[in-house]
Image (spheres, rainbow, N blue to C red):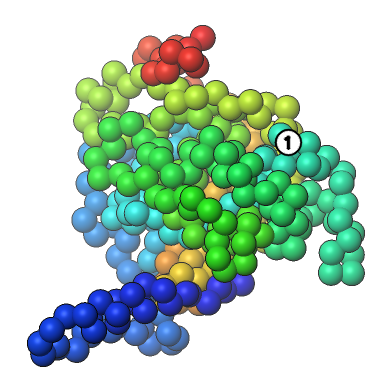
Amino acid sequence: MSVVPRAPVQVATVQAQKAVAGPRLPVPAPAIIAGGPWTSPTYADSTDGDNIDGEDLDIRRAAVDSLGQYNGSVVVVDADSGRVLTMVNQKVALSSGFQPCSTVKVSVALAALSEKVIEPATKYRLGGMRMDLTYALAHSNNYYFATLGEKLGFDRVAYYARLFGYGELAGLNIAGEQPGRYPMAAPKNGGVGMLTSFGEEIQQTPLQLAALMSAIANGGTLNYLQYPRTQSEVQGFVPRVKRRLDIATVIPMVKPGMRAAVEFGTAHRAREDGAIAGKTGTCSENHTHLGWFGSFNDVGERKLVVVVLLTGGRPAIGPLAAGIAGDVYRRLGEKNYFHMAQAMTPADLVSSQICCSR
């Protein structure tokens, strides 16, 4: 579902131009891509300019082949260690962020359960039907999550969002990474309900979504993402804990909806033989269509997080991003990747926060 871009920035620019004395040259508008009023192409070489030093080349190959000709980014992270195994389209992955669309609903669900605003079986009558959390996540119901936002209120929503990593760097010393943005107040357009259903006024990076998905996959540890760039850095890799989230008891309540999204909901294109849990997101921002999917495999000895972000015209949607992620899992599954022994030297987690050390 598309959100009509707002115009305050454009108005401010016009006002600023009026304040400038002397003759003014016309400012050219961004190029419009054929097929719709989109300022970003749907198809592009998403590997252009990438530096692949230190990446897992098997995973990189699977991600690049799965993304194909689409304009977007694929980030794959080891859920237990926080190591970034590949980052396809580093310009996008390390950008200032994009509206998270419906992927924000995962953090809202965790917040509502943590605050006991709902139980998993709590049903709201919305749009002529009663639905619980699992159904609402599977089908990405906007009314349900707008209702949760109103019940929580902006302050509690923002508290948990920041706890989960919004508005801060997800990585540790990842060159070029930016912290995204989280608003200081409820959006003027639609209030907290628009924030909790569409991610209004939030700027989320693929790395931030990957970090949160990793924490859900591993039981509640929010690791710093690290991106080793040399073989010596890979061999000396040591996981670093950012903080431990008190969500272990609510993760089992959120997972059914994330798995249902893949099994029969908005992310069904990601469905593979192995169980995958994930959340799609589709919206538009500044004349660019966005398609998100954040996910992790929920079976196997090795848990990988796959985040896909597509940008472009109308084909760039969450279900397509889910299909691309599903193809990554399929390609790696064919190589028996999820049952491979995972070498870690040293194995113990090292925390950088005194308050959160073991």
Residue 302's place in the image compared with 28, above or below, is: above
Q: Position of residue 287 (x, y in %)?
A: 42, 76
Point out the image quarter for the N terminus. bottom right
For badge 1, the amino acid type reads Glu
Residue 26's place in the image compared with 82, above or below, is: below
**Please, which residue is most extreme toward the top here?**
358
**Which residue does the image show at 71% across and 46% down from the upper left?**
152
Q: Is residue 140 left or right of residue 172?
A: right
Q: Position of residue 285 (x, y in %)?
A: 46, 70
Residue occupied by mark 1: 115
Q: Is residue 249 left or right of residue 54?
A: right
In this view, the residue in front, 160 or 217, is 160
Q: Is residue 254 left or right of residue 310?
A: right
Residue 334 makes an appearance in the image: no
Q: Position of residue 72 (x, y in %)?
A: 40, 61
Residue 130 makes an appearance in the image: yes
In this view, the residue in front, 166 or 191, is 191
SS label for mark 1: loop
In this view, the residue in front, 291 or 107, is 107
Instruction: Name which quarter of the figure residue 25 lies in.
Output: bottom left
Q: Position of residue 335 (x, y in %)?
A: 49, 39
* Other-residue count near label 1 (Cα within 10 Å), few / some / many at <14 / 14–19 / ≥20: few
**Which residue does the image show at 64% across and 34% down from the upper left?**
299
**Which residue does the image show at 37% across and 72% down from the upper left?**
9
**Which residue does the image show at 36% across and 79% down from the upper left?**
11
